[in-house]
Every structure is written in structure tokens, then in C-alpha cells.
Amino acid sequence: MNGADMLCDVLLTNDVNVCFANPGTSEMHFVAALDRKPQMRCVLGLAEGVVTGAADGYARMADKPAATLLHTGPGLANGLANMHNARRAHTPMVNVVGDHATYHLQHDAPLTSDIEGLARPMSHWVGRIGTSAEVRVRTEEAYREAQMRRGVSTLILPADAAWGEVQPDTLSPVVLPQPPAVPAGTLSAAAAALRSGRRAVIILAGRALRAGALETAGRIAAATGAALFSQTSDRTERGAGRVAARPVPYNVDQAVQALREFEVAICIGGREPVGFFAYPGKPGTMLPPACEVIQLAGHEHDLSGTLDALAGFTGVGRDAPFLANRFTQREIAAPNGVLDADSICVAVARALPEGAIVIDEAITSGGRLTALSPGLAPHDHVPLTGGAIGEGIPLAVGAGVACPDRKVVAMQADGSGMYTVQGLWTQARENLDVVTVLLSNRAYAILQGEMRNVGVNEFGRNARRMLDLDSPDLDWCLIARGMGVEAARAETIGRFIDLLDAALARKGPFLIEARI
Amino acid sequence: MNGADMLCDVLLTNDVNVCFANPGTSEMHFVAALDRKPQMRCVLGLAEGVVTGAADGYARMADKPAATLLHTGPGLANGLANMHNARRAHTPMVNVVGDHATYHLQHDAPLTSDIEGLARPMSHWVGRIGTSAEVRVRTEEAYREAQMRRGVSTLILPADAAWGEVQPDTLSPVVLPQPPAVPAGTLSAAAAALRSGRRAVIILAGRALRAGALETAGRIAAATGAALFSQTSDRTERGAGRVAARPVPYNVDQAVQALREFEVAICIGGREPVGFFAYPGKPGTMLPPACEVIQLAGHEHDLSGTLDALAGFTGVGRDAPFLANRFTQREIAAPNGVLDADSICVAVARALPEGAIVIDEAITSGGRLTALSPGLAPHDHVPLTGGAIGEGIPLAVGAGVACPDRKVVAMQADGSGMYTVQGLWTQARENLDVVTVLLSNRAYAILQGEMRNVGVNEFGRNARRMLDLDSPDLDWCLIARGMGVEAARAETIGRFIDLLDAALARKGPFLIEARI
């Protein structure tokens, strides 16, 4: 066997059995090795942003990493933006990046580049395999680091390490250490703060937004009067019967307003909320300056266990009451009037099936759905985490691969959708059960708002040429069909509802172009 | 005025008047400044690979840099692969990358990343503006470095440097130093080698492949018996009346075979040819081990002047004869039989108009056109330089913007075309005169060949799933029309010829999907 075979075997031994790929010449031995392992599901993306975004979406839903296969520095580079999003979501991911044979690097061949340099800003761990004899230990290290740090591992595989012979060996799964424990003193301080009578907020992120952890947080909140807020994370289990945490608003003024009353904040799974961007004269952090911040646990901790422990320290029993979301989905009135972001969100809310996975890259258009979500049938919400637009379509690919028995509903803005539109082809090829609601406003609407934020209300030709997506309009139905995804256009809310019902009733990918 | 205004003014003062852009929130003040400068042509790309690839194509044809506008680390990351190609083509380019306000970086907001770390591997020069007072000097430096090094400058513009006030000033163009001179001793040694009776080859790259430099090289070759070869570069002026240099083959065995007889090689504009990839048991450099290599001049030199000087040292007069390509375009017989890569290339060769710009990302499908090119009407050949596929459509955008009065004929493979397919929309929006010949073989055919090179002739399911582009087939006509580009499909060579004639006779973008 060769190094590439060993790499595949280590991945499979650790239950990494999906590889999102866009290979090149330097990875041919790895491709050949994958071809000898039918247990590995190889999923092709026609651009690397699809590959890494799909691996992110897969791991968010499968709670285990996928591998990616990327072609040298430029292939990695194309995947970096969605690695950034995965990094911000603390998604475990094992990227395998091919490189020239070790002895060929001296020639500075055309595709040669500084792969480590490119990988480092968007990876938690970067390693290079020296020889084929190192493949096993380095691959195990990449996997361990991805899992332990909940992060992005990038493993560089030179061609000669892939094709070099290695001794077969009996492999066993990597033993992962227990996550670190939160010190009792910190738990005690947090509990005391919650019982102090000060106005307190618990700010949840990451795996603290899963149903069980949310329920515990809800018991603590109900017992202490603390407020519950959430930050943008890998995914949130939402819906009726669950506990809702209120999202910290994206808009700085609204966020400051929402958090203005709090005297103490307990952060679980993430750090204190900060502004997505800076604006002249506005604050960079969202909590009041006098608010005490207790950093209870980060993404590396067992967040459900931490919340259990906090409940214990706070004197909240496992059967203490909590405020569960009431099921109100059937009470939502059918939207009528114009087709716009609001009416579309209402229509999606009414029709959302239980267990749906809502991919959210709606940008300026998804607010209403979030507002309605607590009353809907239980579902997952999977948002853009790192702000690098162009992840919605790939996230839907990954979620669809991870959860073939659940409906994926992708709320997708047009500007961000175009970044990785190639992912529609993978949805078709893999026959993924994804309904894409394409909100076509033919603008980078968020940037038009940001221009107004900086005081520009009249746009000249250059601003219009950079912020509008018209002239020509994109025809999303043609684009989708060109990639093998059935599609139809709605220009009225009635037509949209009909299309949505039909798309949800069938299996397989479908795109609804909603012109708003 | 603010820092962003100053940045625009410095660019315009230095005749940088095209900005390929995909902005975000942190660049709003820059967008507002561009909006106040109608002299700057802002061209939107719907993904950053389009932006940087277009800037590369523009500079190759305009012989001056364009600016790009990219949104923080992830926006830059999406543009890196085509910056890699530009770096390998020694294309001057000035990237402006927005970043958070300086004082906001401490908060590690979601979009924060190590922009310098991302930029360095694919840039010749990276700089960060500290305050608005530094905008002028840093922008001038970025421009100077791009021009002097013929390279990629990446200038990081924090939001507060963009919005901060600066004093207006009288600007003047940056004075660029003369390129370095090749030492007389090196010229003399090269001339002696050419006159030594040894079998000599002159290997040209970069601007040594422009018509005037090629003609001088042709005079030297005719007088000394030296062979002329070329390496993949930014562009080559090809066609009848000009001098042809034979491309060093991509295939290692063929390259070694083509160069096997030479005892001395004189490299002008690039270094000695090396293998694109390493293969077990095959050499990494292409010249015979005993061949003496004289590195006469690099991309930083005046290559036309260097060739003049070499002619002088070699005793070759300005009126010495050279072997010009004969005009044979009208003698090419119309292709018939099946529609395949060969017959398509013959059809394009017959119809190619004078002054055409041939963008070449045909990968495995373009060989016949290169073979026929010496006899065609004078034209430019603009190839993929760095091996990072996905630059053809953006290069066509840039060439079309740079040369509105010339026909752009883009020979585009399907696999690489999908990487930056979004560029078709920019072709439509800017009404660029681009005919795309889309060679649809529904495979990464080059990789199928490379798999056979590593000894795998029977592909299993995983290999087929990673190397084939079928199931579903891409419908390029729908995709192109979806982005506003008219398109039609050819399945016979007769139909292809008719479509090509019609597309060449009109202005504006058109895509021919040739199913081979």
C-alpha cells in the first residue's frame, strides 16, 4: 500500500467517510486510493468554495468532520473563504491539500506556492507530511486537532508521500481526551451573579444552542429572571417545545439597545458580542460599559454539561420549569398582497416541515422567518457564521449529504448565492433533498443600506454599478436548470406558495426564484 | 477630502482608471469615493475570482495595471487563485483590500482575519495603510512596486484610514526608474555561446514574446542557427509576418525530447523550463543535464532592448533576415467529419479575425489551434500562466475592457470554465465583444490522462465521480443565458462553423457550446 491508501484508511478508521473533493494532478494517487475505498463517499464540487462550504455544512449537521480534497495552493485558496466561515463556526474539518513531490519544490514550478502561508489564517492546525512513513501519524494528528479544537485542520500531502510505499498496520480510532472542565470557582461566581438580583443576561453560542442545552438554560433563566440571548453559531435547534434565545441584533444600534439594561453577562460557548463592523462614533462592543462579563465556557468545553453544572450551582433542579415555545405554526395566516421578503418568510414558516434544516443566507431578507421560528415545528437553523458570503448553497449541499432523510430549506439571497452558484450542480448530481428559496432583489441590498449608513443617499453611476445586480438581471431558473436543478419563478405570493408546496412534497433539489 | 478620495486620486494620477470590484461594508467609503470619480471605470464581478482574473487580463492587454477592490480577508481569499496566475504572468496589479477600522481589530469581529498572511503568498508586495495621512505615500508605493516588479501589489485599507480626513495636495505621476541593465559580460557570454558552434536554444518568455522582440530573436536565430522556444507567459503576439517560437511542451517526455539536442540554452524573460508536475522516475527540468544555461534577462529587464543588445554583441544587424511566418490561413481546408477539439480548432483558425485576442483555457483541447497559429492573421495569444484553472472567462473580461475594438475569442474548457462562470454576467453587463468557444467534454479530461499516467486505467465509482462532469450534464446555453449572454449549441461541425461566423460578425458577448 502507499501513503495515499494509509491516509484513506486513517480517515475511515475514525469514521470520516465523506470526502468533498476537487482534485488535480498532484492528487492523482490520492484519487486512485479513494477509488479503492468504496466505503468513502466522494462528492465533487465544481469550485473549491463549494467543497469547503459543503464540508462545513456536513459537519455542522453530522457532528463529525468530513474530509476535503483540494489541489495545491490555488485550490486551497479558492476554498479559504468558507474555511473562514467554518473556523468561526468551530466546525471540525480535515482538509487534505496536495502538493508537488518534495524534491520538485526547488524548481518553483508554475503551480508552486506557499501552501502553509495560505492555510494558516483560516486553519486551527496546519501540518505537512514529510514522507509516506509519516502519513499515519500526521493524519491522526490532523483528525485529533480538528475534533479537540473543533476546528479546521489542513494537512499537506506531497505527491511523493502519497505514492511512496508504507507498511500496512492495524489501525484503531484516535482516542480523544475529555474536554476541559470549567473551574468550580467560575461556575460559583456565575451562579452568584445570577442570584445577586442584578439584571443578568446569559449569552449562548455554539453547542449551547442545541435543544438540551437550551432547555437547561431556560430552567436557569426561569428560576433567576436572567434573559437569554444567542450569537450566530454553527446551528441552533429551534421551534415549538424548545427554548428560544433571542439573537443579538446585527445592527449596532439595535444590539446596544437590546442589551442596554444588563449589569452582568454570562457568556457560554462564545465571547461577548462585538460589532460586525466599526462605524464612526459607534461602539465596538454591544454590552453596556459597566456590565460585568463572566466568560463561563468556550467552544472547547462540554457546553451542555457546563449548563447542567451551572444549574446545580444556581440551585435549579432538573425538573425546574422552563418557558417552552408554544406551537403557533398553524395559527400563521396565509400571506397575501405583494411578494416580498416578509411574505415569503411567512409562507415558508407556515409550510416548514418538522425536522427541516433551514440554511440561512438570506442576508437582508430573512428577518421575519427568525421572528416566527419559535412557534414552528422543531427544526435546525444553520446560518452564515463568519460573514464571508457565498456559503448558503454549499451549506445546503453538506446538510443534504449529512441528513438524507430531512428536508433542507435554503433561504438564499441572490448576491451571495452567485459566489458559489456551482454548488447547485452538486445538489443535482447527489439528488439532495434541498429546496432553495432564491430571494432575488437584484442588488447587494445590505451594501445599499451600509452606504446610507455612511451618509450617501444619492448613488451615482459607479456606486450603482457596484451595488446593483441588474442590467442584465440574472435568470436563476435558467442558471439552475443549466446545472440540472429544476426551477420555477414566482412573481406573486400565490404562485410562490404553490411552488413551495409542490417542492416540499417531492424529493430532490428544486429552486424557486422569488423576484422581490 | 478623505483617505478614500486620496487613494482614488493617486490611482487616477497614475493612469489607473479601471477598477474591477466586489465591495463589502468595510469599503463603503471607498465606494463612495469612486462614486465621486466618474473618470474611474468600475466593473463589478459577482465573485472575486472574476475580479482578479479580469484585472490580470486587462493588464496583459493594456500594459498597465488595473485596480481591484476586495472585501477584507475572505474577499481577498476568493481572488487569490487568479492573483497566483497574475503573479506567474508578471502582471502589474494593484489590489485594494478593505479591513476593519484599526481600533476594531482588537474585538476579533467575525470577518477579522490575517489579511497580510493571506496576501503574501500571491503578492509581490503587501502593505497596510496605518492612518489616512499615509494613504498617498502607500498607494504610490503600491503602484510603483506593481510596475517596477511587474507584479501584484496588495494594499490594505482600514476603514478608518478611508474615512479619515486628509489634506488635499497636488499629485503628480510616480516616476518609475529605468529597468536594470543586463551586464555586458553576460551579453558577451551569450553571444559567444551562440557563435560557438554548439547547438543552442534561445528560450523566450514574457515581453520577449511581443512582435518586435520576437523579430530580433528571429534575426539572431537565423544568423546563428539557434532554435527559438517559448514558455507560457502573459501573452504572445502570434501570426503571419511575425516570428514563431516553439512552445516547450507541457508533457515532460515530449519536452525532454524536444530539447534533447541542445548544448547551451539562453533564457530571456524567464528561467529554464521545469516540469509542471513531478512524476515518479521522470526528470524535473527539461534541458539535458549537460546543457549550459545562460540566464540572460528576467521579467524585470527591458527584454526588447536586451535582445537588441544581444543582436549587437552577436554581430547581427537590424536589417539581417529572419524567418517570418507565412500567411496560410486561407489555405486551411474547412473541417468536416465529427465535431471534436481538432475540428473546432481548425474552424476557429480559419475564421480568426485580424487583431483577435485568443484567450486560451482550452486545457486538453487547444493544441491544434496553437499548431496552426503561425499562419493566421496577426493576433494575441493569452494563456493560463500559473496553472490555477478558472481564469479563462475572467481573462476575457479584462481583455474586452482593455481592447474594446478587438475581438476576443475565448477557447474555454468546461471544467475550468465552471470555476469562474460568474464572469459571463460581467461580459453581458459591460457588453464586451467576447466569443466564448466552450469545449464541453463533460470531464476533467486532463486528470483522466494523469490518472493513466500514474498507472490507473480502469476507473471505479469514486474516480469517475471525481473526474467526470456528467450526471447531470451542464447545459452551458442555459447557464450563459441565465447570466445574460446569448448562447447556442453545436453538435456538428457544420453548425459550429455557422454559429462561429455569426458570432464573429456581430458585436457583444456570445457563447457557443460545442459538445465534443
Image (cartoon, coloured by chain):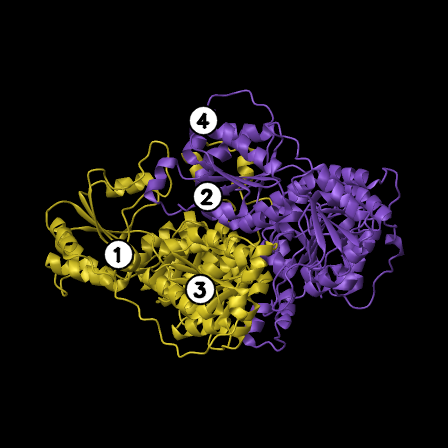
Chain colours: A purple, B yellow
> In the rendered view of the protein, which quadrant contains the C terminus of chain A?
bottom right
Specify the quadrant of the image occupied by residue B182.
Answer: bottom left
Q: Which residue is mark 1?
A: B244
Q: In this figure, which residue is indicated by the disc labeled 4?
A: A133
Regarding residue B421, the answer to whether it shows in the image is no
Towards the viewer: B30 or B230? B30
Identity, as a three-letter code, of the amino acid under mark 3: Gly
The residue under label 3 is B398
Work out whether residue A326 or residue B230 is closer to the camera in this orientation and state it.
A326
Neighbor class of circle 3 (other Cα within 10 Å; few <14, some 14-19, many 20+) is: many
> Pointer 1: residues within 10 angstroms few (<14), some, or many (20+)?
many
In the depicted structure, whether residue B43 falls above or below residue A389: below
Whether tag 3 and tag 4 are in contact, CB under 8 A, the answer is: no
Q: Secondary structure at mark 2?
A: helix
Marks 3 and 4, Cα distance to the nearest angstrom? Answer: 46 Å
SS at badge 3: helix
Q: Chain of mark 1?
A: B
Callout 4: few (<14), some (14-19), or many (20+) C-alpha neighbours within 10 Å? some
Residue at the image point whose x is 29% and y is 42% from the top: B255
Q: Amino acid at mark 1?
A: Ala
Q: Which mark is residue A116?
A: 2
Which of disc 4 and disc 2 is earlier in sequence? 2
Do labels 2 and 3 touch, CB within 8 Å? no
The residue mark sitting in front, 2 or 1, is 2
Q: Is residue B463 left or right of residue A473?
A: left
In-image side of B282 versus A142 (left or right): left
Q: Secondary structure at mark 1?
A: loop
